[in-house]
Image (cartoon, rainbow, N blue to C red):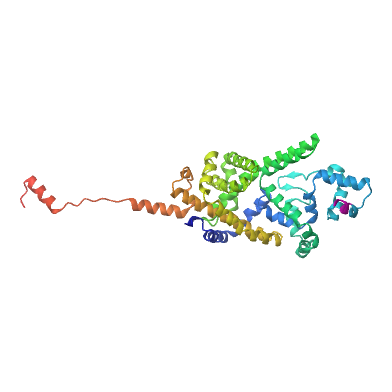
Amino acid sequence: MKDSVLNRREMKKKARRALKLNYFACIAVCFIMVFLAGEYSTTVQGISMWDMTHVADLKYSPEQKKEIVQDMVENGLTAEETNKKWQINNVDAVKKWKKTFEDFGLEGLNSKEVTFFGTTGDGSTINTLLGAFSITKSAKERLDQLTNNSFFENLPDNAILYIDGLTRSKSYKFTFVASIAAAFSENKSFKESFDIFANFLVSLLRALFVTNLLVVCECRFFMESRTYHKTKVGRLGFLFRERTLHPIKTMLIKDLYLTLWTLTIGGFFIKQYSYAMVPYILAENPNMPSKEAINLSRKMMNGHKWELFKTDCTLLGWTMLSMLSLGAVGIFFSNPYRAAIYSEYYIALRRRAKQEGIEEAEKLNDKYIDLELLRDEIQNDSEEKVFKIYIPDSSDDKSEQEKGGVQP
C-alpha cells in the first residue's frame, strides 16, 4: 500500500504555498548559500558551461596548461596552431593562457586561488554569476554559444565537466578522493603534492566551519518558514548565535561515511538519501549525539529513499530550465522550491517517526516546528481524559437507610 506520508503531489503543493508566503526571504537565503556555501552548484555551473573559456580552464589541469604553453613558446606556435595541435577547441582559452604566462610566468597557470567565496579570477562564482547578467554579453550571445556546433561536438566533455562541478562543490569528500587519485596517478614533485594536499585542507576547513553549518542553518530557516511566514533571513545564522558547534562533528562523520561509500559500487547514491535528514535533525536539535542523529535519519528514510530519488528526478526539468535561462530560474524559483520540498519531506517523516514510536524520535523536541502534529497531540490528550462520576441507584439508597435506621 502506498504510504500517504510521502505523497509527492501533496509535498510539492505545500512547498509552493510556503514559498509563496515568504518568497523574497527564501530566494535571498538560497542566493546567499550559492556564495557562502557553494550550494546549488547547478545554477552557477549551468551559467559557466556556456563560457567556453571557463570550460577549457576546468578541463585542463595547471600542469597540462604549463605543458601546452611551453610547447607553444618553444616551437613558436600561434594560438590557432596550438589549439589545433592539442585539440582544445578554444582559441580564446589558449590566448588567455599565453597572456597569463607572459604576465606571471608558468606559476601563473597554477590552480585558481581559493577564497571564502570560492575561486578568484574569471572563473569565480561571483564573476561567473555577474557575467551572466552583464550588459557586455547579452543573453542572445550566450544562447548562440549554447547552440553553436562546437558545443554539441564537445557535448560529452561538457557533460563530464557539469557532473564534476556538481559533485566537487558539494563537500570536501570529492576533493579528497580527487586529490588522492591525482597524487598517485603520475609522478608528482613535492611541491605539486603539497599543493594538492593544501587544496584538500582548505576545502576541508571551508566545509567544516562554513558550508556544513550553513547547510544546517538553511534547513532551520525553511522549517520555520513553512510555519512562520515572516521568518527573517537572519535565521540563517542561528547556530552561530547559539554558539553551538556540535553539528560540525556530526556533519563531518556523515561526510566521512559518504566518502567511504564512494569507494563502493552505487553505495554513495543510496547512502546520500539515507543520511539526507541529518542536517534537518541537527537543525531541530543541534546537540543531538552524532550517532543517534545519523541512525535516526537512516530509520526515517527506511522505505522512502526511492521516493525521494523520484522526487529529485521530477526536479530535473527545473534544472534544465535553470541552465537554459542562464541560472535565472534556479535563483528565482527552483533552488528555494527544492529546499522547501525537502523541508516538507522532513516534517512528514518526522511526524511518521513520532507516531510510530521510532527510537530516538522523542529527541526531536521542538513542538512548534509542526503545528499540525502539535494540534493532533493536544486533541488526543483531551480525548483521553475521562471523568468518572459515580451515581448511586435506588437500591443503594434503600440499603443505606436500613443500615442507618432511617425511616422512609
Picture layout, residue 361 above or below residue 323? above
Residue 101 rendering spot, x and y as whole percentages: 87, 46
Picture layout, residue 284 above or below residue 183? below
> Between 268 and 238, which is closer to the camera in this rendering?
268
Q: Quadrant of residue 150?
A: bottom right
Magenta range: 82-86
> Between 24 and 153, which is closer to the camera in this rendering?
153
Outermost residue toward the right?
Answer: 76
Residue 243 appears anywhere in the view: no
> Between 23 and 232, which is closer to the camera in this rendering?
23
Residue 277 appears anywhere in the view: yes
Residue at 80% across, 62% down: 149
Picture layout, residue 7 above or below residue 194? below
Residue 92 rendering spot, x and y as whole percentages: 85, 55
Residue 399 rendering spot, x and y as whole percentages: 10, 48
Residue 21 rendering spot, x and y as whole percentages: 55, 60
Residue 308, magenta (yes or no): no
Residue at 58% across, 44% down: 239
